Amino acid sequence: MATTQGPSRTARPTLTARVPARRPERVWLGQWNSAVTSFYLLVGATGLLTVIGLVMVLSSSAVTSIADGDSPYAAFLVQAQYALMGLPMLIVAARLPLRWYKRLAWPALLVACVLLVAVIFMGEDANGQQNWLAFGPVRFQPSELAKLALAVWLGAVLGRKQHLLGSWGQVMVPAVPGAVLVMGLVLAGRDLGTALVLGLLVGGAFFVAGAPLGLLAGGSAVASFVVVYFFILNQDGQDRIDRIAATYGSDCDKASECYQSIHGLYGLGTGGVWGVGLGASREKWSYLPEAHNDFIFAVIGEELGLFGTLLVLALFALLGLAMSRTVRRHPDPFVKVATTAVACWVVGQGFINIGVVIGVLPVIGVPLPLVSAGGSALITTMAALGMVISFARTEPGAAEALAARGSVVARSLAVLGGAVRRR
């Protein structure tokens, strides 16, 4: 008897979607391309450098403070007060709308020039430089304020005329006279180090604005001639010539012009890879001049070793990277020029200071931004970086992303609060 067989049942393929695994490099690339990457890099690097500066000022100044009959925390407490003064300025600057910076550009430059003129007639002399102004108990450096004012003013002037900068006349007026005025007033106080930093700031602003390369080359040549002829080769420039000879010459007196540079190198060499330990520096025992100020990088290298110096270098590189990212992503020409000016100021001054400590550059006398002791420099630098953080918050998509992350945090806190109440 034949049996009929039903149709054979074959297994039907399952239509399960395969989700490709995300590669780690794609995850990192996605984070880097986030609209808020510049914002978080700026906030993180600024905060870490400020904290490192407070710790190292305490470590490098305690011995000399005790030797002077003061508390070992004297210099640290002063620097901490400046940091607490700079923090609200950073926060306000980070929240200030973009249009306000454009409105403040001309008044800020005017105030800076008035203060620089006042320094010439009633300023205080320190280390051969007349760059301090005192109003009662308040003592500050107007040249630090001039850096921020000039960066904002160049952003407003060059950004507004960016499409016309192919013409030399449009570039020259009023940007060049304004920059020359500020730099000339700083040089009148014999502050060559600050003038060099201002030169970096101005050069970066003109370059990113699209000024003709011939103008940049000519301006650099004129500035170099003025500095060399009037501030190095004249009768008052012997000290600067000695510093240059001590750095690049084959023979120098280790007890005079080479003393500070050699002891800075001693500190870096003693630290090795991991350092001698926080607080255990030997050079800060009155061997290294300006240990908590211009040469604080040497104490970092001695106490924290190669690891500590590379950390500081990496943080300055992150600041530069974040600001270059803001320049590329932001559509406003004012933001591009002002951010570049601040980047050349902060990062450029940082590498000048480090170059002096490691013996690549002659001793100039500029502090390490956010790290060295000094109130005017710290407060002004924090305000400038707060302004750049404000620019990063207005990058395309950044405001929406920050608002969305804030709402997620608020909802998470609400859920946690509800769970606690139910318990």
Image (cartoon, rainbow, N blue to C red):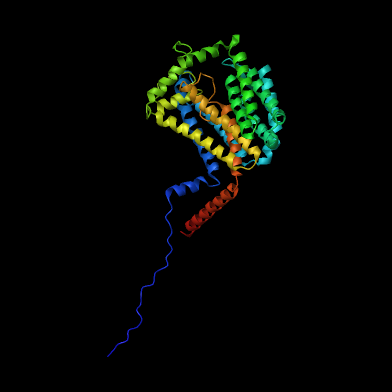
Give the total of numbered labels: 0
Res. 127 image quadrant: top right
The residue closer to the viewer here, 232 or 115, is: 232
Query: Is residue 180 shown left or right of residue 327?
Result: right
181 on left or right of 392: right
For the question of whether residue 278 can be seen, the reply is no
Pick whichever, 266 or 142, lies toward us. 266
Q: Position of residue 419 (x, y in %)?
A: 48, 58
The location of residue 141, given as percent across then percent down, is 61, 24
Instruction: Spot the residue most to the left.
Output: 1
Camera-side residue: 37 or 164?
Answer: 164
Q: Residue placed at 43% from the left, 57% from the top?
A: 20
Q: Check the image and name the residue furthest to the bottom.
A: 1
Q: Residue at x 44, y 22 (%)?
A: 63
Q: Quadrant of residue 101?
A: top right
**Residue 387 is at least partly visible in this image:** yes
Toward the front, the furthest residue is 2
Percent coordinates x, y for residue 133 in the rendering: 64, 21
Q: Quadrant of residue 149?
A: top right
Looking at the image, which residue is at 70% across and 35% down?
164
Looking at the image, residue 23 lies above or below residue 263: below
**204 vs 290, nearest the viewer:** 204
Q: Quadrant of the N terminus?
A: bottom left
Percent across and percent down for residue 176 are: 68, 26
In the rendered image, the vertical position of residue 80 relative to residue 285, given as above or below? below
